[in-house]
Structure formats: structure tokens, C-alpha cells
């Protein structure tokens, strides 16, 4: 599943450059420029992909490794 997340990240990186809406004067909902609407939808898509990355591609083995390390009481620092 992490490959899917990486693929979506690459796709979002490509779609971030929306050159196709630069000269478009279309209004969404009668007041919102289509370029701004595109970036609002794009931001929501980025949030969804980030949530997928946390759920499916997060390196949990590093967290498990960090939890195994028990700090010693004698760390050599003055208290």
C-alpha cells in the first residue's frame, strides 16, 4: 500500500502545476475563480493523501525501535 501512497504523492506533485487554468475566467458557484477552486480541492486531496501516508506508509518499525530504548537514570548530565 505504501507504493500507492508514493504514486499519489508523485501524481499530486505533477497536478500542482495547473497551467490549464491560468487564462480561464470561469467562476465556480458564481463567485469563485476556477483556479482558486482547483487549489482548494487540491489541498483537500493533499490532506487525504497525507492521512493515507500516516495510516499505510508510516515507518512504525522506527517507533517500535525507539520505544525499546529505555533511558538510563545515569545519563551523565548534571541535574
Image: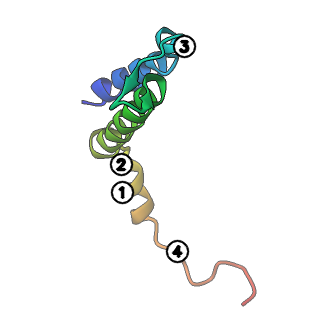
> For the point 45% across and 60% down, which residue is it?
66
Q: CA distance from mark 3 to mark 2?
A: 44 Å
Mark 3, secondary structure of its residue = loop
Q: Please name the residue that numbered disc 2 is placed on.
A: 61
N-terminal of the pair, mark 3 or mark 2, is 3
Choose the circle earlier in sequence order: 3 or 4: 3
Query: Looking at the image, is mark 3 or mark 4 nearer the viewer?
Result: 3
Q: Are marks 2 and 1 in contact (CB under 8 Å)?
A: yes
Q: Give the label, 1 or 4, closer to the camera.
A: 1
| Mark 3, residue position | 22
Name the secondary structure under disc 2.
Answer: helix
* Nearer to the camera, 53 or 27: 27
Taking 9 as reference, is 48 above or below it?
Answer: below
Quadrant housing the N terminus: top left
Give the labeled residue for mark 4. 71
**Which color mode does the image show?**
rainbow
Q: Quadrant of residue 28?
A: top left
Amino acid at each position: 500500500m505504501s507504493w500507492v501512497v508514493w504514486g499519489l504523492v508523485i501524481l499530486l506533485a505533477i497536478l500542482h502545476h495547473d497551467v490549464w487554468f491560468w487564462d480561464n475566467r470561469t467562476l465556480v458557484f458564481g463567485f469563485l475563480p476556477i483556479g482558486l477552486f482547483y487549489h482548494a480541492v487540491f489541498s483537500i486531496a493533499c490532506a487525504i493523501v497525507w492521512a493515507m501516508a500516516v495510516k499505510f506508509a508510516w515507518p512504525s518499525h522506527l517507533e517500535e525501535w525507539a520505544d525499546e530504548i529505555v533511558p538510563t537514570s545515569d545519563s551523565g548530565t548534571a541535574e
